[in-house]
Each structure stands twice: as structure tokens, then as C-alpha cells.
Image: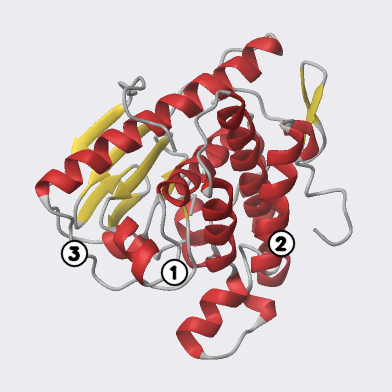
């Protein structure tokens, strides 16, 4: 990705080196993640301008109890991650600059999309941390992976995760890293439309299996939104050869089936809450090819 020399977002809080103890209520586990509009739409089509958006938000089942109070995180993977070793200071600072540029690019893309629809895009903040961090959703460790907390509308990431993405999950490349951020911002888009709070209310009457199925649709839509962002990034001429393949590979490597096979040697489809590798790759590609948020309707199709 051609990112050097690009604008860096000011919406970044650098808390690296500020280790904090403790864990969130119930314990936070990893997955990738979601949260401004102020309305309270139901689980129906949301219209922003002429674009129909089906937007929902829900955390992985491991942290659903946290969301009962209106908070909750949305993370990137479903398998617990080992303690991450932090990159060297120089490499970490370069990664931090990269993250700031990617966040700025998401601000530009979603800002334009909302503006064309006559709406204002409330930009999320991103927190860089190391080891542990406190969010409005509680305490989280590096093992949680990147996540989005709707309670404070912030994306959280320990840069050591990117080493795990490359080495443990076989997903190298800077655009794989960008995909992670774009996915989390996709959850922010879902949350600011007001659908995430609505789903949190409705999910209390859902069984675990029903909530898992809805969570999959939410995650796939965030993947699709990441693809929409990638579409406009490509139009700017920022993509390099192999970038798209890096993102598609990352989506494949963090599918529920791939993660479960890697961690336990077999899969349990009933426990899936992010989508299979094929599904995640498919919906990222749909967003990328169309460049339209309205194409990310993961809720009306029978088998997303």
C-alpha cells in the first residue's frame, strides 16, 4: 500500500508503554471488531441518502455478557492469542504511523459516503496500547486482539498483533494489516447508525445459537464495509500489486473454520460467530467490487 507521506489521523491515542492490570468483566477474548448516529432504528433497512444499509452490531459470544450494560467489544479473531512480543521501538513507531494513515483514509472514505447522503460521519478514535488497556467495555489484554468498543466508540489495537497476524496466522503484508483496521471501523459504522444498541436489546431473548448466527452476519457486513473502503483506496491509486490478495488471504486465515482447525484440529459450526473463511473472503470481495455500502446486505440473503 502506498501510504508514506499521506495524512495521519489526529484521532489516535498512543498509550503504548502504559501497562495496566486486570481484565474486563467476565474476561475479554480476542476476535476483529465494531459502534455514532443517534437514532434507534429497528433491524430493518437503514436508508442513508439513497443507499440501503443493513447494519447491525454484536460482539463474539465470549463477551456478550459485557454488552448487557450497553458496552461490549468487537474483536478480530475467535481463538485466544498467545502473549504478543512488541515490535522494536523503531518498527513500532513506523507501524503506528501506518495505522494513523490507514485510519485517516477510512475517515476520508466514510466521511465522503456520509456527506453524499447528507449526513455527518462521527469519526472514531483509535487507541494504541501494549499488554493491557482499559476501555469503556472494561479491561482487555493483548490476547484480546484488535477490538472496537461501542461504549466509547474507540478501536483498540496492540501493534504486537500484527506480528501474530504474519507469523501465526500466515497473513503477511501491510494491506492485511489495513484490512484489520478497516474491519473494525466497519463496526463503528454499524454502531453509529444505532442498530448495534437495538440488536443488544433484542439479543437478550435470543438463544446462543441464534445470537451466533446473527453475529456472523454482522461480521460479514463489517468485512464487506472493509471491502468498500478498499475499493475507494484503490481508486486513489494507493494499492500496490498483491495488496488485494493480502487482504483476501487475511480474511481467509481468520475465518471461524480456519481458526478452529488451527487451534483444536476440528470445527464446531454451531459455535461460529464470525463466518467461515469462504464467507469472509466472499463479502470483502463484494464490497471491493461494488464500492457501495448498499451491496453489503448480509441479512436478506438466505446463506451469507
Residue reaching furthest top? Answer: 118
Nearer to us in this view, 197 or 113: 113
| Residue identified by numbered label 3 | 85
| Residue identified by numbered label 1 | 170
Q: Residue at x 59, y 67 (%)?
A: 255
Would you say the residues marked 1 and 2 are in contact, meaning their CB atoms lie under 8 Å apart? no
Left or right placement of residue 121 versus residue 290 in this view: left
**Mark 1 / mark 2, whichever is N-terminal:** 1
Nearer to us in this view, 185 or 192: 185
Q: Pointer 2: residues within 10 angstroms few (<14), some, or many (20+)? A: many
In the picture shown, does residue 253 fall above or below 240? below
Whether residue 128 is visible: yes
Q: Residue at x 62, y 26 (%)?
A: 235
Dot label at residue 279:
2
Q: Pointer 3: residues within 10 angstroms few (<14), some, or many (20+)? A: some
**Mark 3 / mark 2, whichever is N-terminal:** 3
Amino acid at each position: 500500500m502506498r501510504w508514506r507521506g499521506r495524512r495521519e489521523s489526529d484521532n489516535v491515542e498512543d498509550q503504548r508503554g502504559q501497562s495496566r492490570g486486570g481484565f474486563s468483566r467476565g474476561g475479554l477474548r480476542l476476535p476483529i471488531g465494531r459502534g455514532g448516529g443517534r437514532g434507534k432504528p429497528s433491524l430493518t433497512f437503514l436508508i442513508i441518502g439513497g443507499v440501503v444499509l443493513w447494519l447491525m452490531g454484536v460482539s463474539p459470544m465470549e463477551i456478550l455478557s459485557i454488552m448487557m450494560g450497553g458496552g461490549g467489544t468487537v474483536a478480530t479473531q475467535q481463538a485466544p492469542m498467545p502473549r504478543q512480543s512488541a515490535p522494536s521501538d523503531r518498527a513500532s513507531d513506523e507501524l503506528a504511523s501506518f495505522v494513523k494513515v490507514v485510519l485517516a483514509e477510512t475517515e476520508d472514505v466514510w466521511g465522503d459516503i456520509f456527506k453524499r447522503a447528507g449526513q455527518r460521519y462521527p469519526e472514531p478514535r483509535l487507541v494504541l496500547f501494549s499488554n493491557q488497556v482499559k476501555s469503556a467495555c472494561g479491561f482487555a489484554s493483548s490476547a484480546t486482539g484488535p477490538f472496537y468498543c461501542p461504549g466509547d466508540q474507540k478501536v483498540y489495537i496492540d501493534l504486537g498483533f500484527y506480528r501474530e497476524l504474519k507469523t501465526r496466522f500466515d497473513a503477511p503484508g501491510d494491506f492485511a494489516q489495513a484490512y484489520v483496521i478497516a474491519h473494525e471501523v466497519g463496526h463503528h459504522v454499524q454502531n453509529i447508525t444505532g442498530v448495534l444498541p437495538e440488536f443488544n436489546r433484542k439479543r437478550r431473548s435470543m438463544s446462543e445459537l441464534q445470537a451466533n448466527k446473527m453475529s456472523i452476519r454482522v461480521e460479514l457486513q463489517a468485512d464487506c464495509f472493509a471491502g468498500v473502503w478498499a475499493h475507494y483506496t484503490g481508486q486513489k491509486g494507493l494499492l500496490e500489486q498483491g495488496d488485494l490478495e493480502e487482504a483476501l488471504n487475511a480474511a481467509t486465515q481468520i475465518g471461524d473454520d480456519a481458526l478452529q482447525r488451527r487451534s483444536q484440529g476440528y470445527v464446531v459450526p454451531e459455535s461460529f460467530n464470525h463466518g467461515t473463511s469462504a464467507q469472509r473472503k466472499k463479502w470483502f470481495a463484494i464490497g471491493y467490487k461494488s464500492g457501495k455500502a448498499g451491496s453489503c446486505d448480509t441479512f436478506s440473503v438466505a446463506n451469507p
